Amino acid sequence: MDNKSIKKLESDLWESADLLRAGSKLTSNQYCMPVLDLIFLRYAYSRFKRVEAEILKDRPMRNGRVIPVEAIDFAEKSALFLPREAQYDYLVNLPEDISAANLTDRNGDQIASLGAAVNNAMSMVEDQSEQLKGVLPKEYTIFSDELLSELLRIFNNNALDDVGGDVIGRIYEYFLNKFAKNVAQDDGVFFTPKSLVEMIVNILEPTSGILLEIIRPKMIQFNASKMCA
């Protein structure tokens, strides 16, 4: 994808997402991190599909069926495993009436809204990575099902299946800078968007384990209310 195409994709995604926020009662502060992490989840799913296809190429069979992929298969390829309920296409294709679908979350509790289903997905993603523990937002029930469904649809863009971690990091940073009016400063700790982008890319497509340990404390000290205001 060339630079012009990337810029158009960034702009189109932002305009669509921002139009939804403008039509809602949500503030930028409420909207910022949940939207950013939908981008993260969408790219995580694209990465998951690519690695799954690699695994299935030489997958042995048992009783006439291909052995299902497991988390350990992804760990061997330094990739993030996504349980079915945390996969983007699962969320996009949930029925309109969630409460009637008889869905339960990872704790066995009833899922009554699309927001609760996305919260559950984020929790399941965190279960797959120590670096993500307690980091992903689980506040999607502040969104109406209609608004959240539209957001999921916006980021279900086929172009995101064809880009690498550097491009998705650029899109993420574009959104982050759009949301942020000023660089966040909290108790003398400056948050730099580039560090967050690097963390995201290296969780999904890691080349070493050292960078994650360096970057994670910056994420924990990040004051979302200041950054997204």
Image (tube, rainbow, N blue to C red):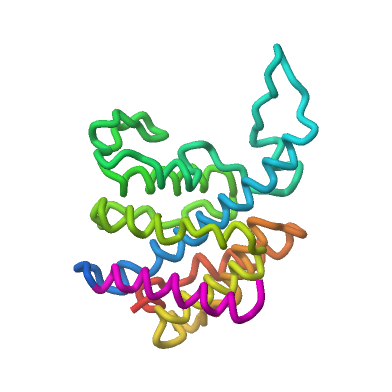
**Residue at image location 30% in from the left, 72% down from the top:** 19
**Residue 220, can we see it?**
yes
Residue 77 drawn at (x, y percent):
75, 45
Residue, far left: 25
Given residues 205 and 209, the one toward you in this image is 205
Q: Residue at 33% across / 53% down in the picture? A: 149
Can you say which quadrant of the picture contains the C terminus? bottom left
* Residue 106 position in % (x across, y down): 42, 34
Left or right: 92 in relation to 200: left
Q: Is residue 12 magenta?
A: yes
Q: Is residue 165 magenta?
A: no
Q: Main secondary structure of the magenta part?
A: helix
Q: Nearer the viewer, residue 64 or 28?
A: 64
In the image, is 46 to the left or to the right of 223? right
Residue at 68% across / 19% down in the picture? 65
On the question of residue 213 being in view, the answer is no
Residue 189, x across and y down, in percent: 51, 80
Q: Which residues are magenta?
A: 1-22
Name the residue nearer the viewer: 66 or 119. Answer: 66
* Above or below for 208 versus 48: below
- Residue 47 image offset from top left, x and y in percent: 63, 52
Looking at the image, residue 65 lies above or below residue 45: above
- Give the answer, above or below, for where 204 lies relative to 51: below
The image quarter in which residue 228 lies: bottom left
